[in-house]
Image: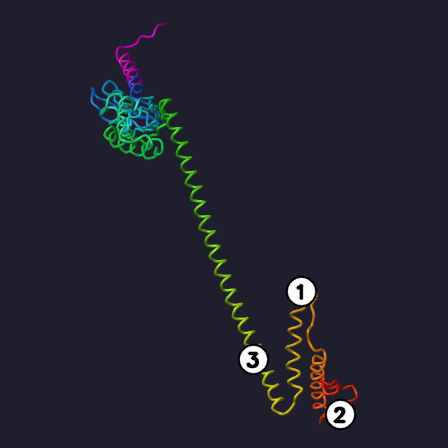
Amino acid sequence: MPVEISGFSIFVIAAVVLAVVLVFMGAKTVPQGMEYTIERFGRYTRTLAPGLNLIVPMLDRIGVKMNMMETVLDVPSQEVITKDNALLQVDGVVFHQVLDAAKAAYEVKDLERALLNLTMTNIRTVMGSMDLDELLSKRDRINHQLLTVVDDATAPWGLKVTRIEIKDITPPKDLVESMGRQMKAERDKRATILIAEGDRQAEILRSEGEKQAAILAAEGRREAAFKDAEAREREAEAEAKATQVVSDAISSGNIQAINYFVAQRYIEALGRFADSPNQKMFFMPVDAAGVMGAIGGIAELVREAVGGNSGGGGSAGPWRRGPSEDGS
């Protein structure tokens, strides 16, 4: 038996279906790392964050789906003329992140293309104001200047440039060869300077060593002269004392003291003459009896000294032989 559906029932069913459709149309899921802009009648109203969001169906629509993650943008190779007119091929890379989806969507058209052109223009500006040597040795400075300029320029777009790096700087082949020759010449120059500096330092040290050696030698000679003078002084004092003793002995009537003094000088002269390397044989045109008498005088002095120490000076004994016994 057919079931009749009234017009009211049809209306209710249609309303429920429409409500379900509208709910499905108004529910929007935004993935992590993305943000959606919402437009109502073509005008921006709000931004949907990651997760489940509801919009007004038929009135609201999704405008731009914006990636909020940090993104890498390659800068293609381009020609750059340096301050000293060197032609180079330069490329790089830009790291950027969208902080404000609405500004990135509505403040600039084609965000990545705008960022790329801005970066390439500033690369030519910054590197064109520097010499070739600065470009090759100061990349950190170039990167810092580029980052400061580009980041300030893109701030109104809701964009944050986190890093700009110059990847390759390629000079022409002839310039590379010229740089190689210049580097070799510079190294040869530094090597020559270092060798000359080493030779100069060696000469200075050698001169200082010779100076110190001369000073030490002079001090040694001075010390030796002081010692020699002191020795001669003491020898002179001893000689003076011996002469004084002999003089006292002579003044007291002891003739043997004269014989001792003369014999000592006589024997010393003969000893020096005999030690001479140029004399191997010599004649003695001297009186042997006089020499023996002088030696006898020495013996007499020894006897008297021994006798005096023993207490009074007794007879010398049968061994004594004075000069008078020899007939001298």
Q: Secondary structure at mark 1?
A: loop
Q: Residue furthest bottom?
A: 312
The disc placed on residue 279 is: 1
* Magenta stretch contains residue 236: no
**The magenta stretch spans which residues?**
1-20
Q: Position of residue 130 (x, y in %)?
A: 29, 31
Q: Secondary structure at mark 3?
A: helix
Q: Which of disc 2 and disc 1 is earlier in sequence?
A: 1
Q: Nearer the viewer, residue 224 or 62?
A: 224
Q: Which of disc 3 and disc 1 is earlier in sequence?
A: 3
Q: Main secondary structure of the magenta part?
A: helix
- 10 Å crowding of disc 2: few (<14), some (14-19), many (20+): few
Q: Position of residue 49 (x, y in %)?
A: 31, 28
The residue indicated by pointer 2 is 315
The residue indicated by pointer 3 is 237
Q: Position of residue 238 (x, y in %)?
A: 59, 80
* Magenta stretch contains residue 7: yes
Residue flagged by tag 1: what amino acid is it?
Answer: Gln
**Up-down: is 288 above or below 160?**
below
Residue flagged by tag 3: what amino acid is it?
Answer: Glu
**Up-down: is 19 above or below 243?**
above
- 10 Å crowding of disc 1: few (<14), some (14-19), many (20+): few
Q: Mark 1 or mark 3: which is in front?
A: 1
Residue 3 visible? The answer is yes
Q: Quadrant of residue 34?
A: top left
Q: Dots 1 and 3: beta carbons under 8 Å?
A: no
Q: CA distance from mark 1 to mark 3?
A: 33 Å
